[in-house]
Image: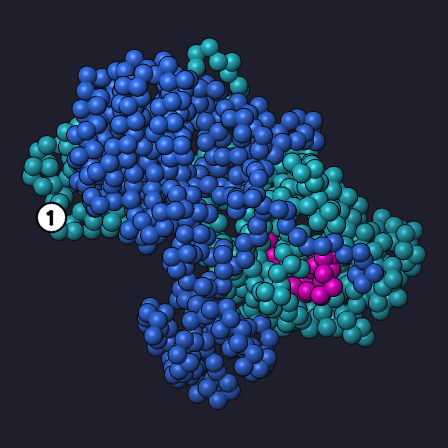
Chain colours: A blue, B cyan
Amino acid sequence: MSDVKRIEPRTLKGFRDYLPEAMIPRERLIETARRVYRSYGFSPIDTPALEYLEILTGKGSDETDKQLYKFQDHGDRWVGLRFDLTVPLARFAAQHIGTLGTPWKRYHIASVWRGENTQAGRFREFMQCDFDTIGTLSPAADIETVLVINDLFAALGFDNFTIRLNNRLLLNGLLEKLGLAERSVPVLRALDKLGKIGPEKVAEEMAATADATAAQSADVLKLAGLEGSNDAVLSEVSKLVAGSPRGEEGAQKLRDLLAAAAAAGVPERRLKLDVSIARGLDYYTGVIYETFLNDLPKIGSVCSGGRYDNLAGLYTKQELPGVGASLGLDRLLEAMTQLNLIEKVSTPAPVFVVYFVESRLHDYLKLAARLRAAGIGCEMYPEAKKIGKQLQYADKRGFRAALVAGDDELAAGTVQVKDLKTGASTPVTLVGDALEQTLRTLLASVEP
Amino acid sequence: MSDVKRIEPRTLKGFRDYLPEAMIPRERLIETARRVYRSYGFSPIDTPALEYLEILTGKGSDETDKQLYKFQDHGDRWVGLRFDLTVPLARFAAQHIGTLGTPWKRYHIASVWRGENTQAGRFREFMQCDFDTIGTLSPAADIETVLVINDLFAALGFDNFTIRLNNRLLLNGLLEKLGLAERSVPVLRALDKLGKIGPEKVAEEMAATADATAAQSADVLKLAGLEGSNDAVLSEVSKLVAGSPRGEEGAQKLRDLLAAAAAAGVPERRLKLDVSIARGLDYYTGVIYETFLNDLPKIGSVCSGGRYDNLAGLYTKQELPGVGASLGLDRLLEAMTQLNLIEKVSTPAPVFVVYFVESRLHDYLKLAARLRAAGIGCEMYPEAKKIGKQLQYADKRGFRAALVAGDDELAAGTVQVKDLKTGASTPVTLVGDALEQTLRTLLASVEP
């Protein structure tokens, strides 16, 4: 190979390698999400990374169309890499819902690709982690979505987080009441800029693009700006939408949602009505969820979703309402790193077996096999090198304990158990299950 | 949406949707593989689906190059979808080995794409599940690879499987001894056709392309054709390669490998020397593994690998020897289906909560939350429909038990536990943990 012209090993801009110390927490996070989704009866599905281009461009916005990785395949078909898991879900549901039946609950954890500008720390390949309940209009499914989000973050070790709730019926009801229902798109487009340009400019835009009077835009801005306790907001909201059946329905649904979530054990402090969250112009039609980490609000919502009326209208005439949310895996991992919730470990096995005396290979293999059979993961160093070098390796990788045994120990039927955090060594007999017990106690112990 | 032109929902030829009943066993299989890999200290990594095209075409054969999904991205760079996990591993190792250090053990479970002919039930997107130990020449790593394969299949519920073993040093040693070392490529190319064209035609081809004498090709064919017990094969092999240091080393390594695997607890019947397996013309340089299910030999090897001298020579001057194997996930799932090792279940939660009395929603939510907190997955039907309809749904999905409670039961503090396999119902109190205990017993029980 010495005369070979070498190729520079590198990844494409916007793409990442995951080294073990990043991948181990990522797998843990995914496993936790999977466990929580499953505990509610959500089933896994998977769809192809590549789809017919027409499937992907059918619903996407101009922006997502522009970001699509698309090309002609070996059969000259135009194909594209999925840019989210919602379009594949819609296509999948249209195709299979007859087999699956409704209500149908699925989760989908998979990579998506977007050729977007990488300036702002954005990546072109990232993982989405969605769960949805399809084929039911029942508020019970809306409630369950809140419970899943709450369980998910609790299972990940968070306590201090807030699920912000809104319902699109409130604003739709108010617009209807104000006679602006037909002009909801320009109204929403203006309202969407509230954070950026402030209420006065929004009112100006509403006047210009939706022909809204000052009184009308004042009411819309009042609704979007409501703050305070959940009870206070609900009371104000109810006044604003009074007389609009749609608006009153939205307020009642939020009231029911809060009561049911509390009954199911979600701490009240974690639920916050927030009439300002909108999530897109028209996809969501009912309840809307956003989830914020109170210790790190700047990173934005880490789990968002809502209710929609018609998932798969582009692919089937069957109306499929649904509700669900998506966990922002990469953003959450970034947050967990910043909050020191991730232990720095690059080995998934906690115990290290020193390969000390070359002729004793079989003994070390037996020792390691015995521990694995007892459910204790362990790695044996593959070469009979100096102990110091092996322990250095073990330290760097983050093992919790090392087993050291030379001829003397093995002849006596013992092994030294070395705590790699304190450096202390204890001789333990190989008879009975003293070794397993010692290791289990050590592995369960908190840091000294 | 009624006036929208609909798009036919379909997947590309050679690509598959995974419905829950296929995805649940697939996730279980992946989890088992992950658990076994981890128990040996293999760490997870991930790499981008898209790589620079030059990275992917550097090492691939003409065949893989032709099958590559390649295109120009938004920046007019030529890129391609990975067609295996070995090339990305080589690129990854070349790039990061300084940070990772050696020896380094990784697993990688991810999708790969090949635009191949879909005639023979082949797919254009499939998952690979590889593990490798990089940066050591030690036979201990070769041995460990056998142990991982053995543990993996045992953990998946197989007992009757055979790991076939060979070592490339045997044939290389023999060729060296015969003076054919320089002509090993045409010799191997001819030998590779043994199963298809038979020994006489192979000898003819060896004479034509490698200038091999009748005696030379007879010896090569004798080695490749050896059969019998491991001891008998080893004894014959030793005679054939006697005098060639390389060949003798190969025989000794196989002997050591068998002894060490037995010492570590691998049943002897699962290990079989097979001098005929070669696995490619030049990639593997030492031990070679193939794994067959004895009840389904026709599907071929379900876990294959071997030792290589230089993983990443295309990308770095650092020599990185290694050893590893790849689990054929899709082939194995197909086999497990054929062997009835997969239970037909399309829900990952075992318990179903009937939403019976609409006004009792909070009670059902509490009941479900209580069971989930106890680690018992349960799904609540989202609508207060007729019991019959809900139980039909539960049956179709494969739930194990249903909880039914109306006003009377809830007022009395009880719930009916319905065994969905026998149809029997038992009232259980909600006081204490009788319900959890009843369900745990039911879920642990074998089928009636």
Chief secondary structure of the magenta span?
loop
User: Within the magenta stretch, is there residue A162?
Assistant: no
- Above or below, B159 against A185 in this view is below
- Above or below, A106 against A315 in this view is below
Picture residue at 41% right of the left edge, 66% below the top: A376
- Foreground residue, B257 or A414? A414
Please give left or right for residue A428 compared with residue A12 in the image. left
Q: Where is residue B393 in the image (x, y as percent from the top left)?
A: 31, 29
Q: Which chain carries label 1?
A: B
Picture residue at 24% right of the left edge, 25% below the top: A250
Q: What element carries label 1?
A: loop
Q: Position of residue B165 (x, y in %)?
A: 65, 61
- Above or below, B172 against A79 in this view is below
Tag 1: amino acid: Val
Q: Identify the image quadrant of the C terminus of chain A.
A: bottom left
Query: Mark 1 — residue?
Result: B431
Would you identify the image quadrant in which residue B219 lies?
Answer: bottom right
Q: In this picture, which residue range is highlighted in magenta?
A: B307-326
Would you identify the image quadrant in which residue A171 lies?
Answer: top left
Please give left or right for residue A114 compared with residue A345 in the image. right
